[in-house]
Image (spheres, rainbow, N blue to C red):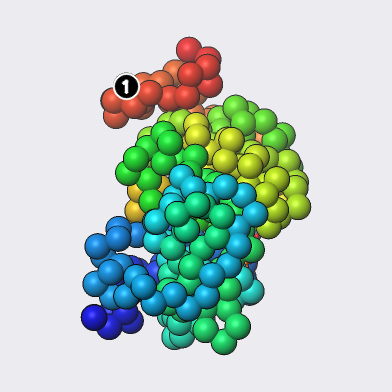
């Protein structure tokens, strides 16, 4: 059995959580990540029959039966993951009946998976139903995106169009747009279900006054999505109190999509 501390998936989680912390997106224990791993990759480092603990799930996760995920820990700080991976994250496997999960590594010293695990698993199931290559769900609290949810109307189309207008690259990075949920209690099945309903059509769902849920095929795609939304929100916050002399028109956004051979969300551009 290889040394799990050298596993590419453990190294990548250390790297990404450290970067997210340095971006200022994950104060204290804010934010959480889960990543669906390939069984072969995990079983080079962990004995699949060596279960440390089994914990219940409060919804049906059978669509992920037998899948391994690496997940950050509840109450644990992203800034500590790199120096103590085994305390601050762990590897889980969803049970065959989808009613519980096994912990195979990590979550030492009283740790357990993020309180947002139901939302992560529901969102993995939703994204996999529309994209079999989907693997990552990432949640964090970037300041400008949060600020924008206080001052902008929380309508999916209006919010998306404002973001698209803030940087030329936005419509290229997320042509399907973003979705926004009103404020809800976090860590519940309800917020998980509401997010999963929206995330079938987009890879970014914003939680008003709370943060971002991003989904992607790998860490780079998911991190890049969040980074781009947050950059656009930063520009919006910088200019929202200044009269605009110009912006990017819908015709220009349509021209960008044509050039990049992308289809923008139907009905969002007035062209
Ligand atoms: P956890 O510490 O349980 O991961 O929660 C952090 C968070 O951001 C809740 O939305
Ligand atoms: Zn949060």
Total labels: the figure holds: 1
Quarter containing the N terminus: bottom left
**Which residue is depicted at the point 33% across and 81% down?**
5
Residue at 29% across, 29% down: 260
User: Is residue 207 something one can see in this rendering?
Assistant: no
| Residue denoted by label 1 | 258
Determine whether 214 is above or below 2 in the image: above
Secondary structure found at label 1: helix
Disc 1 packing (10 Å; few <14; some 14–19; many ≥20): few
Foreground of the two, 164 or 101:
101
Q: Quadrant of residue 117?
A: bottom right
Q: Quadrant of ligand 1?
A: bottom right
User: Does residue 14 appear to the left or right of 41 in the view shown?
Assistant: right
**Percent from the top left, x then y, of residue 90?**
46, 73
13 in relation to 218, above or below:
below
Is residue 68 left or right of 137 when viewed as pictured?
A: left
């Amino acid at each position: 059995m290889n040394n799990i501390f050298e596993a590419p998936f453990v190294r990548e989680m250390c790297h990404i959580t450290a970067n997210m912390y340095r971006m200022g997106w994950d104060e204290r224990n804010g934010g959480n990540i889960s990543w669906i791993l390939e069984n072969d990759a995990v079983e080079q480092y962990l004995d699949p029959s060596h279960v440390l603990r089994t914990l219940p799930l409060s919804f049906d996760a059978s669509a992920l039966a037998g899948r391994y995920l690496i997940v950050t820990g509840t109450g644990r700080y992203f800034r500590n993951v790199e120096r103590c991976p085994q305390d601050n994250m762990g590897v889980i496997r969803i049970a065959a009946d989808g009613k519980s999960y096994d912990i195979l590594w990590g979550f030492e010293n009283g740790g357990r998976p993020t309180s947002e695990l139901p939302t992560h698993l529901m969102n993995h199931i939703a994204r996999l139903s529309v994209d079999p290559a989907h693997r990552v769900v990432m949640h964090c609290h970037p300041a400008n995106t949060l600020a924008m949810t206080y001052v902008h109307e929380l309508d999916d189309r209006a919010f998306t169009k404002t973001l698209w207008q803030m940087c030329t690259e936005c419509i290229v990075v997320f042509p399907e747009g973003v979705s926004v949920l009103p404020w809800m209690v976090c860590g519940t099945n309800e917020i998980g279900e509401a997010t999963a309903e929206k995330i079938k059509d987009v890879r970014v769902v914003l939680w008003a006054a709370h943060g971002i849920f991003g989904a992607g095929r790998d860490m780079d795609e998911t991190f890049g999505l969040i980074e781009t939304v947050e950059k656009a929100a930063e520009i919006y916050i910088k200019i929202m109190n200044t009269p605009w002399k110009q912006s990017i028109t819908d015709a220009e956004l349509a021209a960008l999509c044509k050039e990049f051979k992308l289809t923008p969300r139907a009905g969002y551009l007035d062209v």
